[in-house]
Amino acid sequence: MRKNVWLIFLASLSVCPARAEMPVNPSHATRDGETARIALKGDSIDLTLSDAIYLGLRDNRAIRSAYLDRVAQKFDLRVAEDRFTPKLVLSGNYLSTRNQDDRYRQGNLTPTSTLLTPYGTRVSLGWTYQHTDANLAGLSHNDGANFSVIQPLLRGAGKDIATAPVRLAQMTEQINRLNLKSTVSQTITQIITAYRDLLLAQEQLKIAQDSLARARQLVDVNHAMISAGRMAEFEIVQTEAEVASQELAHEEARNRVDIARLALLQLLALDLHAPIVATEALQAKPVEVQADRALKQAEASQPAYLAQLLVGEQAAINLAVARNDRLWDVSLVGGATQQRNRVARGDGARNWDNYVGVQVEIPIGDMTARQAEVQAQVNVKNQQIQLAEAHQQLDRDVTNAVRDMGTRWRQFEIAQRARDLSRRKLEIEREKLTAGRSSNFQVLSFENDLRNAENARLNALISYLNAQAGLDQTLGTTLQSWDISLND
């Protein structure tokens, strides 16, 4: 008989659904068909913008942390969707007891299986086996099975209510995916901005070097003019002071390059001593964007706005559940039980019973259900207000981003024209100085104008490129623009 008991025990284990362990092995975002192209040249590492984005997707700590969070979030969804699968609980014990009359050894085994259906039906099936072996009373054992079904008619009834936790979990999963998209998009935008900050600092260093070289060249011209007797010796002081000023500006520009390089390396989670050099060509083309089409795109792909829509749907589901919880608990019930008792010497007895009926539970004087409904109603109205605010904010952000990009392009065109005119103006003034028709003061003034114009053009170009990246983030199209797959 004991052999049969253990066979039943093993059979009950076999009906348990298989549970594969989920390894904590998060995926990561990638660029389609893209690999890093980092070339080591001498003591510097050339880094393009595509390389920076690739490294950021692979090593950025914020992105890696977001993907680690996704492991737990996806398991939460798996647990919620497991709501309607059969559950099996195995319980048992073995006791050895003694009293003034006898000594007993008793074992119990009770497997119980439960099932909840998408319509709220609760089914339970259990079996109990008890084995007692006494020194004097002898051997006895009994076993029995019980089966019950409860079908709610009001509270907890219906597919919409029974599946509400699963639908809420699925919406939460969609929100989590949108948050992941938002995190990756924001981080990519930060990397793009940091990379262009490094480009800006490098170009400003070149401008400072060129200005310093022109100032030293002007000193040589002054020496030649003094030697030819065409300039008073004291007038060279202005030029030498300009050289010292440009040397100071050059040192400041080098410092800004190091600051920008370290900021980019930290975003990429690379060694801060890595001698990276931004090598992306600074080019820009005008892009025409219509505000109304941009708003439609944002409404379809902006993660924060889409998440707000889902939160509103969750609030509506919670309100439906809260209203259902206020109903009476009226359920159809039915079941059957069977029990068999046997002893070592003597006949066994078999008993069975079944039932069917209705059970009713009516709460009186309990305000908690009404409290939950009021809170759910308020939350629904608040979500409607927040959705209207989110849509207006999205409209405002898109309008500002589109206008800002157009403004930045016009500023770049003006700055480029001003740079070209300043350069030509300086060339003419240098020729006039060589011919003795101008002064150091005038040349140095025009030199300062050219330096300012070059910096203004560079700042306008970087601002325009960053405005494009900002528009992508506002529209929620950063990943599409850079062919990035979340691989979630």
Image (cartoon, grey):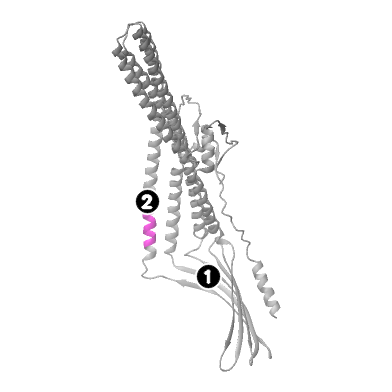
- State the mark number for residue 332: 1
Looking at the rendered structure, the kind of residue marked 2 is Lys
Cα–Cα gap, marks 2 and 1: 36 Å
Horizontal side of 319 relative to 51 (left or right) equals left
- Residue 109 at x, y percent in the picture: 61, 77
Which residue, given by chain and number where applicable, does mark 2 sit on?
381
Looking at the rendered structure, the kind of residue marked 1 is Leu
> In the structure shown, which secondary structural element does the residue marked by tag 2 occupy?
helix
- Image height check: is 305 above or below 364? above
Magenta stretch? Answer: 371-379
Q: Who's the residue at 67% across and 70% down the image?
A: 11
Quadrant hosting residue 350: bottom right
Horizontal side of 3 relative to 329 (left or right) equals right
- Image height check: is 226 above or below 361? above
* Residue 221 showing in the rendered view: yes
Q: Nearer the viewer, residue 187 or 474?
A: 187
- Mark 2 closeness class: few <14, some 14–19, many ≥20 residues within 10 Å: some
**Magenta span contains residue 373:** yes
